[in-house]
Every structure is written in C-alpha cells, then in structure tokens.
Image (spheres, grey):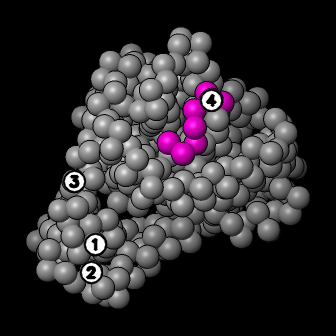
C-alpha cells in the first residue's frame, strides 16, 4: 500500500488531537491528558529541538564550504538580510492597515476590559519583567549578543542560536580560505555529517503524526480545562482582535507571498504550498520556528528546489530574525490595546510602531510566546500602558500558532526568491 503523504498524516494527527482534546475536556478528564497524552507531545518537541543546534551547525558549515568564493557569500548575505527586512516592514504595515480599518479595540466593553485585566494581571507582570531585562541594555546590545565568547556554551542553549550561526559562518568562511589538502577532509566530514542529520530529521518525522496529536489534544485541554464553554466565551470576547490578526496573517500567506513569488521568481504557489505544508502544519502545532527549522530546511531543499548551500544559510538566519507573522501581530496588538484604552495613535506614533515592531520581531526568540514578551518593547515605545498585555493574553497561544506558520512561510518564500535571483533554483 502506498504510504499517505506526510502532510496528510500530520493533518489526520492534528484533527484527531483536537477531537480527542475536546472529548477529554467535555468529559472532565483533563488530568488524563496531562498524565498520558502531553508527555508524547513533549518528547516530539524535544526531539526537534534536540537536532536544531547540531543541524544548523553542520548544515551551515557544509553549505558555506560548498560555496566557491567568499564574495558570493557576502552578496547572498546582504540580499538575505535586505529582503528579510523588507518583508517584515511590509508585514507590520499590513497589520497597521488592517487594525485601523477594523478597529477591534473600540468594541471592547469597559466591563470586559476590567475583567481581563484582573484575570491576567500576574501574567502580564511576568512578561513585563522578562522584557524589562531586555530594556535596560544599551542600543547595541543585540549585536554584542550575537557573538559568542564560548561556542560550546552557546551550543548548549537553543535560544543562543544566533551565536551558533555566527560561529558556523565564520568557521565555514575560514574553511573556504584554508589550503585544499587541509580543508578537504574537514569538508568531507561535514558533508557526511549533514547527510546523517537529514536522515535523523526523517527518522523523527515518522513520529510527527503522533506528536502533533498529543500536542494539539493537550493544548485544547490546557486551554479549555474542564469547562470548554468558558474558553469559547473568552475567545468570542476577543474575537474581533483575533480576527484582525488572522486577516493580516492570511493576507500574508495568500496575497503577499504568492505575489512576491510570482513577481520575483515566477514560482507556482501551488508547488510552494504543497512543498511547504508539512513545515507549516508543524509550525502550527509547535508554535516554534526553531523547532520547525529541521523540517523547513528539508522541505525547502527537497520539494521547493533551493540548493543546500543556500537553504543552509538563509533558513537558520530566517528562523531567528525574520518573523513577519510576529511583527504583524505586534502591530495589531499594539493598536488594539491603545484603542481599548481609548488612546488615539496618530500617524507618527504608527510610524514608530513600524520601526519598533520590526526590531522587536527580530529580537524575538523562535519559541512559543516570545513575540508577546517582546510586545512590551513596542508598547513602551508607543507610550501605551503595559497592563494592556493582560487583555490579549488569553488568546495569545492560538494566535502564536498562526503567526509561527507565517514566520516559517516567509523564510521559505525568501529562500526561493534568492535561489531564483542567483539562478540556482531547480525547476
Ligand atoms: N512562536 C513564534 C515563533 O517561534 C514567535 C512568537 O511570535 O512568539 O516563530
């Protein structure tokens, strides 16, 4: 019997997970999920995270080593960063347009506002503390943080991925510059190790349908507890805000990216979606671009036709710095909170949001909930009370799942465009 395509397997796993989660919730069995279902989701995410650092390291070094000259690397590097910035600014602007048209904060009743603020005040405080640490640093601190003082230490934490990337790029460049008789065995080692990593990703992905089943069913139970009706009520109260974010995100996926792909790469969006769907579904289930990275890399290389040397460079950087979905969400959330507090943000204030949301999304780690922590910076800059985060906390996880899909899709879209402009896209 022919094996079902991976994305179908994942979709079935997700649907079954949602149904099972609802059954557990409605029947009041939420502890069963905690004890017996959630652990499998955790194992799956851990496996994905486990390979993230070694994969980025091996793949980047082998990718750069296969570039013949360093000038090509700097050309591709500046192109990558330039396009990433461009798409992020586009996403923030789109978010601002949507939220200014829909104005979701205006329909929020004072009563609801007070209720949410009370309910989630503690959580907002902890997000504020996290962001407070970021805020007290100097303006160049994010750049200083990119350079590791100890690469082995950097490799022990997935949140220091950017440091691992910097090391790998420098190592790869040095490898290209080294005399052939010394460089050759090292290159061979990394090329071989890269193949092994790809095999490892495939091995782990066999577990994906079960993994997403466990992730989604426990997520539903966590969200709804033993009272799904209350959860629904909450979502409805924040419905217009959520819809604004979702409309913006959907426009990125179904309007902006197809247009960019068509214009700059003459690339079929059908092929793009078909190739990317396993990574998108995984991004949705895990809410983490970093955890999805191994699969994104595999799909973009094998299905979309971007060569390894480009994928290995563009995608790890994208996963950490290019977050179109997150920046769009931050723009919508900021204006929503301002509206809810009865503040009117003028043109200049909104221009400020474009800048800070772009920077904040670059600074967000590729893990669940990171975008909300960095939102504090955007609010602060716009002079909006940080307590407002309490208003949107309840629906954040759902929106996080969706914005992560956009984050991952954006990276892949840029990879295709760069491969095309470099004349390296396999049709
Ligand atoms: N979860 C997102 C990601 O990993 C980041 C965020 O917006 O919270 O891409």
Inspect this view and state whether residue 348 appears: yes
Label located before the other in sequence (2 or 4)? 2
Residue occupied by mark 3: 233
Circle 3 sits in a helix, a strand or a loop, which is it? helix
Residue occupied by mark 4: 383
- Taking depth in this image into account, of 372 and 364 the one nearest to the observer is 372
Spatial CA span between label 1 and label 3: 13 Å
Snapshot quadrant of residue 387: top right
Residue occupied by mark 1: 225
> Is there a contact, CB below 8 Å, between mark 2 and mark 1?
yes
Q: How many marks?
A: 4
Which dot, 2 or 3, sits closer to the camera?
A: 3
Q: Residues in magenta? A: 381-388
Q: In which quarter of the image is the C terminus?
A: top left
Note whether ligand 1 is within 8 Å of mark 1. no
Which dot, 2 or 4, sits closer to the camera?
A: 4
Note whether ligand 1 is within 8 Å of mark 4. no
């Amino acid at each position: 019997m022919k094996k079902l395509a991976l994305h179908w397997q994942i979709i079935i796993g997700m649907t079954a997970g949602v149904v099972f989660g609802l059954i557990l919730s409605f029947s009041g069995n939420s502890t069963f999920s905690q004890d017996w279902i959630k652990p499998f989701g955790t194992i799956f995410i851990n496996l994905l995270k486990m390979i993230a650092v070694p994969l980025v390291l091996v793949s980047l070094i082998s990718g750069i080593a296969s570039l013949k000259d360093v000038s090509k690397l700097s050309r591709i590097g500046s192109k990558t960063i330039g396009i990433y910035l461009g798409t992020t600014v586009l996403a923030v602007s789109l978010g601002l347009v949507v939220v200014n048209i829909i104005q979701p904060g205006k329909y929020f009743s004072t009563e609801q506002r007070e209720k949410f603020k009370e309910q989630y005040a503690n959580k907002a405080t902890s997000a504020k503390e996290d962001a407070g640490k970021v805020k007290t640093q100097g303006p160049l601190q994010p750049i200083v943080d990119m350079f590791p003082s100890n690469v082995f230490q950097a490799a022990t934490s997935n949140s220091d991925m950017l440091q691992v990337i910097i090391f790998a790029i420098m190592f790869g460049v040095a490898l290209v510059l080294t005399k052939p008789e010394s460089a050759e065995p090292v290159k061979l080692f990394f090329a071989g190790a890269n193949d092994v990593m790809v095999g490892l990703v495939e091995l782990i992905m066999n577990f994906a349908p079960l993994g997403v089943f466990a992730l989604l069913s426990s997520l539903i139970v966590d969200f709804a507890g033993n009272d799904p009706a209350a959860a629904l009520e909450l979502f409805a109260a924040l419905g217009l805000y959520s819809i604004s974010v979702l409309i913006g995100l959907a426009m990125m996926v179904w309007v902006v990216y197809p247009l960019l792909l068509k214009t700059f790469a003459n690339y079929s969006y059908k092929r793009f979606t078909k190739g990317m769907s396993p990574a998108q579904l995984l991004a949705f289930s895990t809410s983490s671009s970093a955890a999805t990275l191994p699969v994104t890399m595999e799909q973009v290389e094998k299905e979309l036709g971007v060569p390894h040397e480009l994928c290995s460079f563009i995608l790890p950087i994208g996963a950490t710095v290019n977050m179109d979905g997150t920046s769009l969400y931050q723009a919508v959330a900021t204006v929503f909170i301002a509206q809810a507090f009865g503040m009117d943000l003028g043109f200049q204030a909104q221009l400020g949001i474009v800048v800070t949301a772009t920077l904040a999304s670059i600074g967000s780690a590729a893990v669940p909930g990171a975008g909300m922590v960095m939102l504090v910076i955007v609010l602060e800059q716009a002079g909006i009370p940080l307590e407002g985060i309490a208003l949107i906390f309840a629906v954040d996880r759902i929106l996080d799942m969706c914005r992560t899909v956009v984050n991952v899709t954006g990276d892949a879209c840029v990879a295709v465009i760069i491969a095309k402009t470099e004349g390296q896209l396999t049709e």
